[in-house]
Image: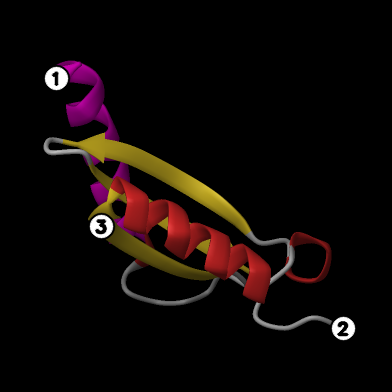
Amino acid sequence: MGKARKRHEDWTSKRRKNSGGRSDSAWKRVTLTLPRAEAQQKAREFLAKYPKAAYWSEVESWRELPGDIIEFTLRRLPSAD
């Protein structure tokens, strides 16, 4: 499990560096780190507020951290037409 976590951290770090802090992507993203129950609730609220049919919203990535903590990224398009 340690190797997989390290690869994910390296991949995430590289992706953030490659973006150079710019927001060239059309996607709006938010990354959160919460206890499991709060993470589930926050994801449900996000998906209710920004429905997939209108915003293409989704949980883009997630990982489990020690202590039943979840780090996850939610993404959506900025507006629905």
In magenta, the rendered stretch is 1-18
Give the residue displayed 66% in from the left and 68% down from the top.
48
Mark 2 secondary-structure assignment: loop
Q: From this viewpoint, is residue 15 visible?
A: no
Identify the image quadrant of the N terminus.
top left
Q: Are there few (<14), some (14-19), or many (20+) residues within 10 Å of tag 3?
A: some
In the rendered image, residue 3, in percent from the top left (x then y), is placed at: 18, 18
Give the residue displayed 81% in from the left and 71% down from the top.
54
Mark 1 secondary-structure assignment: helix
Give the residue displayed 87% in from the left and 83% down from the top.
81
Q: Is 69 drawn above or below residue 32 in the view shown?
A: above
Separation of residues labelled 1 and 3 (CA atoms): 19 Å
Mark 3 secondary-structure assignment: strand
What amino acid does circle 2 point to?
Answer: Asp
Q: Which residue is mark 1?
A: 2
Asked if residue 3 lies in the magenta stretch, the reply is yes
